[in-house]
């Protein structure tokens, strides 16, 4: 879909073949489909020398999310293309990014559980169809606080203040032991813990040094273990966006 959209937009009638190899497991809230879509958008732009703007690349990659979510959305593809911490306004499409504080680290726990087909669409369908103004304001304030903390490195003001009170309560039942994982991670030093994407992975944000990050990782493993669920935990830092490593004629 990404390649078709890009070629049609630029009146290119070539037939192309795209082969994608990636290490991001699909269906676990890690942006697997977005990674594929972003790679296709960047590759087409490089192949034909289109020189598209960042927003144009994000728009093209967004089309690739139709296959997994049933509708176009830009949050994950924008992050894959731009890197860093990304904020997206869908209409009119505007994507901006900034490099978080160098002290920020993430502990991502990926539980070894079965996930439903078209999981993103399933996760969207269980979200509340109506929300109160109070909840909307609270979530918006939390998102703003989180963005400010990541940009400035002042994570001491977090500690649960950026908790999602709309999507998280609706989705956490799909993640065995979520409350236990979250509680243990915060006790171990995480500043915020949330569902990664549409789940079931769980992400903890911290400014702790590497050794302390391993304590958080172990706490998350122990949380999942309380419901007899094994998990893989990855400790990482925010990275840059997509780039072409090699181009051959």
Image (cartoon, helix red, strand yellow):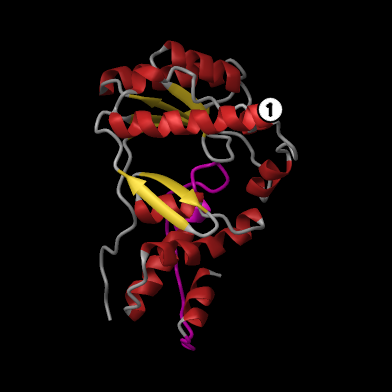
Query: For the view shown, which residue lies furthest in the top direction?
Result: 187
Whether residue 6 is visible, yes or no, is yes
Task: Name the residue tied to disc 1.
Answer: 173
Prevailing secondary structure class for the magenta stretch in the rendered image: loop
Q: Return the residue nearer the eye: 91 or 26.
A: 91
Q: Return the residue nearer the eye: 145 or 44.
A: 145
- Residue 216 % position (x, y): 39, 19
- Residue 229 % position (x, y): 58, 24
Relative horizontal placement of residue 126, taking residue 115 as reference (left or right): right
For the point 38% across and 15% down, the residue is 189
In reply to whether residue 131 is colored magenta, the answer given is: no
Q: Which residues are magenta?
A: 11-35
For the point 33% across and 30% down, the residue is 105
- Residue 21 % position (x, y): 42, 59
Q: Return the residue nearer the eye: 164 or 195.
A: 164
Instruction: Please state the total of marks drawn on the protein image.
Output: 1
The N terminus: image quadrant: bottom right
């Amino acid at each position: 879909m990404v390649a078709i959209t890009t070629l049609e937009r630029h009146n290119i009638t070539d037939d192309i073949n795209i082969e994608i190899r990636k290490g991001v497991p699909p269906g676990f809230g890690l942006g697997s489909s977005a990674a594929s879509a972003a790679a296709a958008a960047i590759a087409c732009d490089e192949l034909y020398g289109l020189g598209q703007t960042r927003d144009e690349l994000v728009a093209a990659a967004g089309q690739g999310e139709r296959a997994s979510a049933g509708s176009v959305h830009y949050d994950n593809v924008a992050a894959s293309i731009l890197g860093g911490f990304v904020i997206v306004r869908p209409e009119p499409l505007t994507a901006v990014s900034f490099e978080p504080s160098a002290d920020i680290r993430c502990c991502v726990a990926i539980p070894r559980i079965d996930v439903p087909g078209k999981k993103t669409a399933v996760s969207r369908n269980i979200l509340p169809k109506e929300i109160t103004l109070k909840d909307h304001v609270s979530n918006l304030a939390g998102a703003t606080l989180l963005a400010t903390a990541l940009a400035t490195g002042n994570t001491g003001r977090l500690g649960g203040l950026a908790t999602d009170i709309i999507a998280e309560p609706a989705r956490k039942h799909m993640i065995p032991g979520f409350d236990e994982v979250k509680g243990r991670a915060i006790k171990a030093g995480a500043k915020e813990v949330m569902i990664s994407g549409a789940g079931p992975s769980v992400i903890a944000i911290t400014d702790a040094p590497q050794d302390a990050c391993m304590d958080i990782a172990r706490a998350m493993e122990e949380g999942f273990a309380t419901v007899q669920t094994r998990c893989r935990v990855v400790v990482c830092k925010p990275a840059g966006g997509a780039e072409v490593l090699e181009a051959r004629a």
